Amino acid sequence: GDTRLEVIRRVLFEPARREKPIQLEGEALEQHETIERAWKLHKMRSREQRERSLERQFRAMNAAMTELEKTSDRLYKGALVKSRHITYPKQAKIPTETPSTQGWDYTY
């Protein structure tokens, strides 16, 4: 048979081999559990902080739209209209949580 087909089948359909987890006992187990709990607590706090930040941004945006509606109905309606011809700048980047691997382009 075709070895390429066998390789594809093996890669796609064989279950991944998993190493047996390390059996911890005593103080090592307690240290591991403490680190795990601390990591989960850290992740929970950063998630909550991000949610609070997004909530503040949403409230500020909502307040700005309310103020715009009070100030000028024409501008308010214009802000709500979506353009059918959206053009993005060529330098546009997708927002990410991590910095770029290339760093800042100072020559731009």
Image (spheres, rainbow, N blue to C red):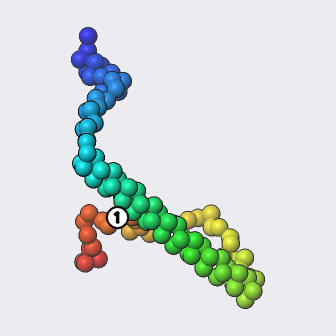
Q: Residue at x 48, y 69 (%)?
A: 49
Q: Which residue occupies the foreground of this view, 94 or 17?
A: 17
67, above or below 38, in the image: below
Q: Residue at x 53, y 71 (%)?
A: 52
Look at the image and tell me in which quarter the N terminus lies. Answer: top left
Q: Residue at x 34, y 64 (%)?
A: 98
Q: Give residue 2's quadrant in the image.
A: top left
In the rendered image, residue 44, in percent from the top left (x then y), is placed at 45, 61
7 lies left or right of 92: left
Judging from the image, what secondary structure is the residue with disc 1 in? loop
Q: Which residue occupies the foreground of this view, 9 or 59?
A: 59
65 lies left or right of 35: right
In the rendered image, residue 77, in percent from the top left (x then y), is placed at 72, 76
Q: Give residue 64's quadrant in the image.
A: bottom right
34, above or below 15, in the image: below
- What residue type is disc 1 on? Thr
Look at the image and tell me in which quarter the C terminus lies. Answer: bottom left
Which residue is farthest bottom? 71
Q: Which residue occupies the foreground of this view, 54 or 102?
A: 54
Visible residue check, residue 85: yes
In the rendered image, residue 61, in percent from the top left (x then y), is placed at 61, 77
Q: Residue at x 38, y 68 (%)?
A: 91
Return the residue at label 1.
Answer: 98
Which residue is farthest front? 26
74 lies left or right of 101: right
Q: Residues within 10 Å of mark 1 (few under 14, many from 20)?
A: few
